[in-house]
Image (cartoon, coloured by chain):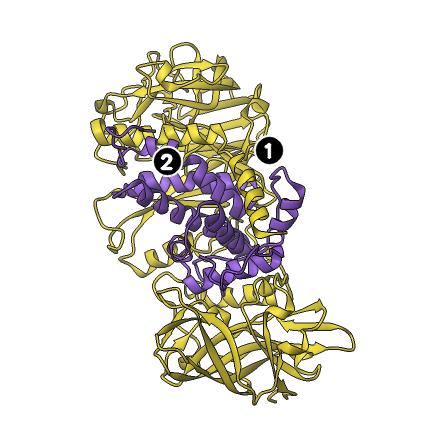
Amino acid sequence: MLEKDFVRLYKDSQEREHAPSQLVEGACVQAQRVDTARSKLFSGLKRKMHRPKRALRVAACVAALLVLVGGSTTLMLSQSPFGQPQARAYAKTPNLLTEELGNGVVPFALDGQTAFQGWNRDATGCYTGMQFTLEGNGISRVQATISRGELYQVTTETHDRTTEEGNAILDEAVSWKPSVRGTGDHLGAYDWVSLSFVEDGLDRSDPAHQTQLRLIKRIGSTVDVPYEGEALAFGLWFGDLKVESGLPDLHQLDGTELTITAVYDDGTCRTQTMTLHDGWFACSPSDPEQGSDFVMAEGPFDEKPKNSSDRPPYSGIVNTLYGRVAAIIDEPHPYPLENANIQAAQAPVPYAIENDLPSYGSTLSVEGVPAEDCMFDAGDSVSFQEQVNDSDGWIDLQWSGFSARTTEALDTSEYIQPSEGRDVIAFQGNYEYLKRVREKTNGWSIDENGVVNEGNSIVVVDVNVTNPGTESVKIDTGLVGAICNIDRNANTTTFATPGAFSAKDNKARLWTPGHDLWMDPGETVNLQVAFIVDDTLMESGKLYYVLGALDGLEQGNLTDGLDANRYVALGTLKKTS
Amino acid sequence: MHSGHNIQPDLENAEEAVRRWADTVWRLVKARLRNDTDASDAFQDTFLALCRAKPSFESLEHQKAWLLRTACNCCNQISRKKAAHPMQSLEGIDVPAAHRSPTGNLELEEMLGCLTDAQRTAVHLFYFEGYRTGEIAAITGERSSTVRSHLRRARQALRLELAEQNGGDLC
């Protein structure tokens, strides 16, 4: 295909691609909140860690609504059930469990941090972010049952980086904390962890800058938990939602029943049942004295209002579930409690994420062999790896003087680069877990002493690289290649999938793939590049050093043709015993 | 969106930015991630970042580039969570397309499916958005040489032939 034809086809296809309107509207609503807050109500996305100091004057259980702007197209507003300024419509009648808009409707607000997380990421379903909070005085236990899906509990913690523990927890949360319970050293008790930065006026680089973690744990379709004076927040989880345009269709949840019971200290009970429906709500800015940004002002509408501007003074629209109160009785919880909290009772499996990791193996065999003009001997000089400098010129580096050796261990001070800042080299210091991930995905690991695991060898390729140009060039160290074996009889080329582990040069500059190295005009550096090679590949015959980017190698799917690279014969190498 | 020579766009207005660049961001994240679910996440994360960071922009192009850079980072985070490979830089994990999202053209779909995430990103920003390799590098956080490598390899994978020689410079 001619390039110009491809460009025409591609442009035509992109012109037909538009962002789903639901996503756009959701983002607009969030943006409106920001714009309005900036100009009128707040100086930014403020998040208070303490509830408004107005005392609850009701004696009974009151469910506070979380009135957040967002929709099913959320928006990741980082609004926590705790500490976010909230509108509170106090019950006119004490002892009501939930608050209403005044028409028997209880809209569920949306927590942007968790809304629809987990969907299709794993097999465990979708956290909708639709939440309700239960709190009150004189309550000893809270029980709740949902007729479809499950409830999850939301708690929060706030950490900063002024302590070693805080550092470790945040490193885990911001980097590699998987979503499955049991994974992670510090957050393994939770099924999902999300985070948001607290607007505390500190710079993000300030160690004292606070980060709030949203900790989610699935409880079950029935919840039975003690009430200890602090508000309890629960959300709705579903494992079988249909998705449209990347978001669950809330209409399929119509008719779901939510039953909540408050058990009081004196043994009495009050139970409220709601049926849940899909609806749209108009929002309007609230009085800042009431401590919220927006309130659900009108609704539900069966269909999405055309435009928020069509319904002034409302500034936003939200698609969420709402409940209609069906019954309130002074009776115990009507559903069996024997299986309450069943999900919470599931014991975490240490490092369960390993079962979900892909396993690409330590070698990758592809059909075909490189063309002869791609083959070189160790004594040859290879012109390869077009490099560019800032002027976008082309300079081919000269690679020469190839040799290789094997070793049992690498000098960790020379080859294993310590992590810098938040960059992942050793999984935030959790080297043991890093080793397990590497072994699972590509069948190798190196311990803290630089010793490779059994079944693998370390091959160090020694090569001189010259910049023949008149300008300095940056070397893309991601292009230093791999080790392979070429079997022309079998028409097969087999690569060691780990690729380049690390490298150093004669100026003691330590490399890791993906980092830059500048070479002056005319400069020659001696590189020593370390590779992890499966022993079966080591023993298969002659090995070759491959110059090339080898996209997809470590994922077991080499995307470039064999002839895109250059192959330098290293001969037969023996494993160091 | 503002128009007219006497109406200046409000570069501080987040809602305007959403409406102005929604398709631009969507097209990039969709090209990169190739499925609506992940693309929706990346889309939302991108505009959330805009609301949180509240950056000051000098021009519409500055705003656009910021959003595209943020979108790339969001895509990288999503890909990273999926791959969870330890050796990759936080700048991104380049994996072949695992999902296909219909473009309405089966031949084009087949071609794009052969590219890695980074190659598709470079192709999109170069051929559709019209950025030079240096500009693409600033957006993706890669080196210019890497971007050129992505484009070169993409053209090889797509088996594109030039109507006329251009000396190898893809810009």
Q: Residues within 10 Å of mark 1 (few under 14, many from 20)?
A: few
Circles 1 and 2: CB atoms closer than 8 Å: no
Q: Which mark is residue A72?
A: none
Q: Tell me residue A288's x, y (percent).
A: 22, 24
Q: From the viewer's perspective, is residue A467 above or below residue A221? A: below
Q: Are marks 1 and 2 on the same chain?
A: yes
Query: Which chain letter matches label 1?
Result: A
Where is residue A293, by image quadrant? top left
Helix, strand or loop status at disc 2? loop
Quadrant in the picture for the C terminus of chain A: bottom right
In the image, taking residue A471 as reference, residue B8 lies left or right, namely left
Q: From the viewer's perspective, is residue A150 above or below residue A438? A: above
Residue found at the far front of this picture: B164
Q: Residues within 10 Å of mark 2 (few under 14, many from 20)?
A: many
- In 3D space, how far apart are the residues under numbered discs 1 and 2 (Cα atoms)? 37 Å
Task: Check disc 2 and report the residue beneath it.
Answer: A77
Task: Check disc 1 and report the residue beneath it.
Answer: A338
Helix, strand or loop status at disc 1? loop
Residue B48 seen from this side: yes
Question: Residue at coordinates 29% horizontally, 52% vertically from top-left?
Answer: A160
Nearer-the-camera pick, B169 or B128: B169
Amino acid tagged 1: Glu
Q: Tell me residue A136's x, y (percent).
A: 35, 25
Nearer-the-camera pick, A133 or A319: A319
Amino acid tagged 2: Leu
Q: Tell me residue A516's x, y (percent).
A: 39, 70
Chain with yellow colouring: A
Chain with purple colouring: B
Q: From the viewer's perspective, is residue B109 above or below residue A413? A: above
Residue A216 seen from this side: no
Circle nearer the N terminus (1, 2): 2
